[in-house]
């Protein structure tokens, strides 16, 4: 019996949105305290929506599938909607993860959240005058 | 799709001759070894024949072999049984930091039972320094256990030298030879050990059977109490087919050992030379020369082992990894960590092990399959992009 279901395998074998964004509006990096792995999310924000999202992941098959799924879930959503992406929701969208891999699903949501926080913080610093549509 | 099994360290298959030898003892000669009739006689004859063959494999006497249900059981038996039997002399035991969990965890159980434990460190090749063992010995040391070779990185320890040191102290010396018995020559008298563990599924015998060789006269606490089986030290009805299989596998291993080792080491050397040549930032783990013939272990930097393992499996290649993510406990291999390999590099551990069905074509298939897999995962790795940026920026 394979450890991962088909959905997880699909995202692992062909992860969506892999990469980095050069002038990202927000970057979030988290390390996995359990096994020492790492995930970095990059976001572009336009008009309060996640217009682009990319990531890099150093970790197991589940961690890679989770980051891919999180990127898909976030794309096009408002910041408020994106903030509601929880590890449990990610695991549900992946139709389940092995028990000992649930901690990997925390990584994705955390990294994305951190990227949003990073964006909001920058906004605060730069004032509200972020130029729209800068690319 | 091509199917390439390179995980013989996990288990070997059962050889057809071994299976043939076992089959009659399920349905025809199914008697209980302890029975005093013809059925019992046949089973007894088979078990005693196997005992002789297993003893021959390691240069011991037949009556010094105790059959067990696995290498893990042999190790539990040796560590707990020997320490408990000597406890009136002292309560200190010594093991290496890279022992198999069946030794390490048994030692920690002894700690809970009031023993003191010293774990001897290893060098970057996974080698135990006999001098360090000597320095760890105390007046109250009753048992030392150092593995003959490490299954994960293939390093063959200096058992003879360590045995010399231990002998002077009067402690009992056990070696876990699960990775070596049936694979490289062993002569227990020459090695100078007092007890030695081995397991059938490491040399083409069945799973669920192993043995503990115990030098005549060495006292041990029984592992299973009950009847008189195995001299009253390991009670329970003998698993005759499995024991017969172990005997047959031992006989074949002894006869073919040289030829097997020659083949395996050629494959090992081809992979050890080829993989780091074809992919940057790949290091060989374990000792360069004191190495099991069929073991080729690596760390691939910037990526994680489970992900590699899955992509390799997708290409039909079966291997192992010591990465934290592949272990149920989510801890990186204690062996790699004890060798001083940093956690993030240990995460990229891969272990290829060769066996009787392995071919040069298998190695070349791996050499072909690996670069795109590593590349794919590195393109995805934040550690790799950091490394590239630092390199560009002139930092080291
Ligand atoms: S990242 Fe280590 S188990 Fe998932």
Image (tube, coloured by chain):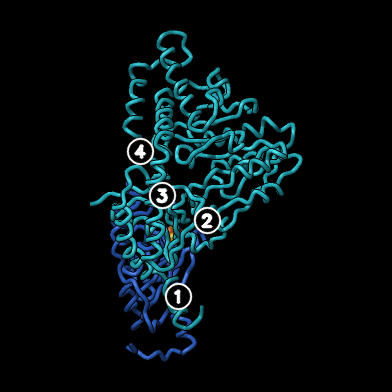
Chain colours: A blue, B cyan
* Residue occupied by mark 1: B386
* Residue occupied by mark 4: B13
Where residue B4 sits: x, y (%)?
Answer: 30, 49
- The quadrant where residue B29 appears: top left
**Nearer the observer, B86 or B331:** B86
**Nearer the observer, B119 or A94:** B119
Provide the secondary structure element on which disc 3 rests.
helix
Mark 1, Cα crowd under 10 Å, few <14 / some 14-19 / many 20+, is few
Question: Do residues under tags 4 and 3 come within 8 Å of each other at their CB atoms?
Answer: no
User: CA separation, marks 3 and 2?
Assistant: 22 Å
Quadrant position of the C terminus of chain A in the picture = bottom left
The yes-or-no answer for disc 2 within 8 Å of ligand 1 is no
Of mark 4 and mark 3, the one earlier in the sequence is 4
Of mark 1 and mark 2, the one earlier in the sequence is 2
Provide the secondary structure element on which disc 1 rests.
helix
Residue B336 tag number: 2
Question: Do residues under tags 1 and 2 come within 8 Å of each other at their CB atoms?
Answer: no
**Which residue is at the far left?**
B1
Q: Which residue occupies 38% across, 17% down?
A: B30
User: CA separation, marks 4 and 1?
Assistant: 43 Å
Chain that bears disc 2: B
């Amino acid at each position: 019996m394979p450890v991962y279901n088909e959905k997880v395998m699909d995202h692992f074998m062909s992860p969506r949105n892999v990469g980095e964004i050069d002038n990202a509006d927000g970057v979030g990096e988290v390390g996995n305290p359990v096994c020492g792995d790492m995930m970095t999310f990059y976001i572009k924000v336009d008009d309060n929506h996640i217009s682009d999202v990319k990531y890099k992941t150093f970790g197991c098959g589940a961690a890679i599938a989770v980051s891919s799924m999180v990127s898909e879930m976030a794309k096009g959503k408002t910041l408020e909607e994106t903030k509601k992406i929880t590890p449990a929701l990610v695991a549900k969208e992946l139709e389940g993860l092995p028990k000992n891999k649930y901690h990997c699903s925390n990584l994705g949501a955390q990294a994305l959240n951190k990227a949003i926080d990073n964006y909001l913080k920058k906004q605060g610093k730069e004032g509200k005058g972020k130029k729209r549509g800068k690319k | 799709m091509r199917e390439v099994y390179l995980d013989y360290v996990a288990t070997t298959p059962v050889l057809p001759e071994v299976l043939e030898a076992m089959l009659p003892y399920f349905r025809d000669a199914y008697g209980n070894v302890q029975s005093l009739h013809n059925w019992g006689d046949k089973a007894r004859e088979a078990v005693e024949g196997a005992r002789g063959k297993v003893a021959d494999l390691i240069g011991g006497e037949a009556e010094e072999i105790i059959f067990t249900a696995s290498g893990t059981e042999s190790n539990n038996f040796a560590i707990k049984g020997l320490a408990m039997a000597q406890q009136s002399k002292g309560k200190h035991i010594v093991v290496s930091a890279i022992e198999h969990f069946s030794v390490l965890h048994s030692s920690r159980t002894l700690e809970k039972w009031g023993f003191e434990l010293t774990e001897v460190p290893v060098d970057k090749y996974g080698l135990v320094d006999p001098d360090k063992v000597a320095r760890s010995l105390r007046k109250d040391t009753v048992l030392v256990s150092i593995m003959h070779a490490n299954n994960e990185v293939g390093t063959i320890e200096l058992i003879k030298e360590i045995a010399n040191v231990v002998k002077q102290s009067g402690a009992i010396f056990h070696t876990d030879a699960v990775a070596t018995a049936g694979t490289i020559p062993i002569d227990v008298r020459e090695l100078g050990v007092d007890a030695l563990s081995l397991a059938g599924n490491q040399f083409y015998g069945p799973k669920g059977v192993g043995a503990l060789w115990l030098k005549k006269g060495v006292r041990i606490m029984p592992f299973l109490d009950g009847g008189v089986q195995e001299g009253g030290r390991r009670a329970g009805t003998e698993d005759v087919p499995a024991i017969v299989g172990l005997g047959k596998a031992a006989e074949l291993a002894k006869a073919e050992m040289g030829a097997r080792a020659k083949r395996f080491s050629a494959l090992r050397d081809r992979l050890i030379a080829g993989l780091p040549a074809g992919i940057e930032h790949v290091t060989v783990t374990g000792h360069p020369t004191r190495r099991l013939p069929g073991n080729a272990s690596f760390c691939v930097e910037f990526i994680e082992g489970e992900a590699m393992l899955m992509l390799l499996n997708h290409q039909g290649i079966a291997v192992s990894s010591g990465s934290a993510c592949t272990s149920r406990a989510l801890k990186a291999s204690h062996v790699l960590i004890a060798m001083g390999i940093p956690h993030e590099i240990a995460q990229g551990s891969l272990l290829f092990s060769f066996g009787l069905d392995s071919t040069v074509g298998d190695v070349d298939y791996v050499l072909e399959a690996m670069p795109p897999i590593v590349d794919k995962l590195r393109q995805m790795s934040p550690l790799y992009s950091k490394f590239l940026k630092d390199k560009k920026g002139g930092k080291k």
